[in-house]
Image (cartoon, helix red, strand yellow):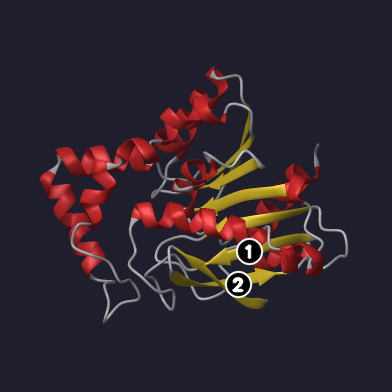
Amino acid sequence: MVTVEFLSSYSRIKGYFFPSSGNDAIATVLFLQGFPGVEGDELICERLAQEKVNVLTFNYRGTFESEGYFSFSNAIADIGAALELLHEAHFLKTYSIDLNRIVLGGWSFGSGLVFAGSVGHPEVRKIFSISGRDFGKEARKIEKDPEYAEEVTRNLAAIRAPEGPVKYRDELLYDLVENQAIFDTEKLTSSLRDRDILLIGGWDDDVITIEDHILPLYRSFSKQGTKVRIEAFQDEHEFSKSKDELVQVIVNWLSRE
């Protein structure tokens, strides 16, 4: 693992690059972490690198050692800045990155951003989502259910700096509600109909259920004629029992033209 830094709207972002174990990487994945994330590997980064996949992950703006303030809109901008890093001459030369094989993927919170983060980046031809949340639905629930909004506010306060790892302003949820169309995954499917999509879920995941989150998205992509598939594991949200199998599914999918 190599520690890297890049700028996103003048804020210094801390990232982690996992070089492919082989000389000819089958793809380069920008992997979006869960929330608030970890400092380094999360879920599958190192395992993917062992399977000849370059992986870049990073701490969202305002989390851990990344500068600035966290917000949903800032996180989307951070994705764009991370993609720019992969296009820099140093990265292209040092890690033999093929710009035709840039992939955006994520887990949990990160998977709630992969589709919004892919809009406007046609070079990202493949997208995978592991237990992805639809933040459009989340925003509507926050807007209509005061008790739920209060619960989310309390959960965020528990990880807020200085005691926690996340720096954010009081208008964090307002940002999500006001910009909910940007994050509405099902509505974004028409803009991503030409991509190759892999949706992954856990049958025993009670955080992001297959029935409520993954199947509706699959149906929406299918209606657009998108190349989309679902892989499901008999596992929970952390995929603690099936990480090796999960990685193999992703590697096989990445290897297909």
Q: In this view, does 59 lie above or below 235?
A: below
**Tags 1 and 2 touching, CB below 8 Å:** yes
Residue at left 55%, top 45%?
129
Q: Closest to the observer: 126 or 123?
A: 123
Q: Can residue 79 be seen in this view?
A: yes
Q: Position of residue 18 (x, y in %)?
A: 69, 69
Q: Please tell me whether mark 1 sits on a helix, a strand or a loop.
A: strand
Q: Mark 1 points at which residue?
A: 56
Residue at left 21%, top 68%?
157
Q: How many labels does the image show?
A: 2
Mark 1 residue crowding within 10 angstroms, few (<14) / some (14–19) / many (20+): many
Residue at left 60%, top 49%?
104
**Res 69 → quadrant:** bottom left
Q: Mark 2 points at which residue?
A: 16
The N terminus - image quarter: bottom right
**Res 158 → quadrant:** bottom left
Q: Where is residue 74 in the image (x, y as percent from the top left)?
A: 38, 57
Q: Position of residue 150 (x, y in %)?
A: 14, 55
Between the residue at mark 1 and the residue at mark 2, the CA separation in whole angstroms equals 6 Å
Residue at left 49%, top 49%?
111
The C terminus - image quarter: top right
Question: Which label is found at residue 7?
Answer: none
Q: In this view, does 225 lie above or below 155?
A: above
Q: Please tell me whether mark 2 sits on a helix, a strand or a loop.
A: strand
Mark 2 residue crowding within 10 angstroms, few (<14) / some (14–19) / many (20+): some
Type of the residue with mark 2: Tyr
**Res 200 → quadrant:** top right
Type of the residue with mark 1: Leu
Q: Where is residue 98 in the image (x, y as percent from the top left)?
A: 79, 52
Q: Closest to the observer: 24 or 210?
A: 24
